[in-house]
Amino acid sequence: MSRRPARSPTLRKAFQRYARVAYHEAILEAAERVFLRDGYHETKIADVAAESGVSVGTLYNYFASKELIFASIIERGRTHLEQAVAGCAGLPDPVERLRQVLGAALRFIEERGAMFALYTQVGFSGDPDLRLCCAPAGAAYHAHVATLAAIIGEAQEAERLRAELDPEALAMALVGIANSFIYRWLDQGRQGDLPGRADEIFSLFFDGARPR
């Protein structure tokens, strides 16, 4: 009988890394289901472990706390948002690129509406222990503003927007207008076509920022 060839240390490590990443993602998927089902505050580590199909001890090998799990879910969402927005990077017209980035962000939020609503509830709870959970979302906000500001700077150079205004301030103004629509959408139970409001949001911003 022939023996099965032994795996090399490099191959064994690759399998171990793959298994760890797979477990990590499976736990996050399960945790998201539990958070959405039970709410953040009611969710316990044991609930996430049960939903993941692993022991509590195994789960602690991947995440030290519920806060870290929630923060990792938000961080994963930030990465997905960046990927969605990156699809607009090749558009040569900065104004159209700005419009498409806004639309991509709104589509992402609509697709992840339930989790976005949960994050909003947690983020505004005022609990100092939840600052860790909110950190990735804060990083996402600043990265998104920086992306918009860079595109706005290009539009200013092309004399499509008022050059005397600070690009970052304009980016924050656009985000502020978008947020007012997003929070109203959340208050209305996530009803309606949020991405369909992109042109309205963009018009409110752009018509007030045209060169004079």
Image: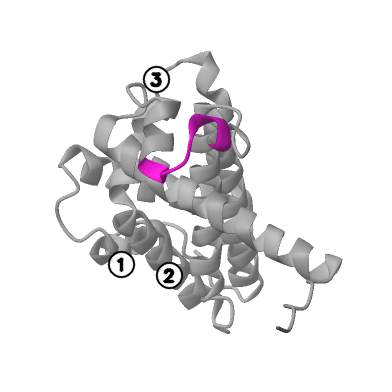
Residue 186 makes an appearance in the image: yes
Amino acid bearing label 3: Ser
Amino acid bearing label 2: Arg
Which residue does the image show at 43% across and 36% down from the upper left? 49
Q: Quadrant of residue 108?
A: bottom left
Q: Which residue is mark 1?
A: 199
Prevailing SS of the magenta stretch: helix
Amino acid bearing label 1: Asp
Mark 3, secondary structure of its residue: loop
Q: Which residue is mark 2?
A: 99
Q: Is residue 10 above or below residue 92?
A: above
Q: Is residue 117 above or below residue 102?
A: above
CA distance for labels 1 and 3: 32 Å
Query: What is the x, y in percent for residue 177?
Result: 37, 48
Mark 2, secondary structure of its residue: helix
Q: Which residue is mark 3?
A: 125
Asked if the residues shown at circle 1 and circle 2 are in contact, with their CB atoms under 8 angstroms apart, the answer is yes
Instruction: Please give left or right for residue 60 compared with residue 194 in the image.
Output: right
Mark 1, secondary structure of its residue: helix
Which residue does the image show at 40% across and 57% down from the upper left? 205
Image: magenta residue range:
51-58
Between residues 179 and 44, which one lies in front from this camera angle? 44
- How would you rate the neighbour count of disc 3 (Cα within 10 Å): few for under 14, some for 14-19, many for 20 or more? few
Q: Is residue 208 above or below residue 182?
A: below
Q: Quadrant of residue 124?
A: top left
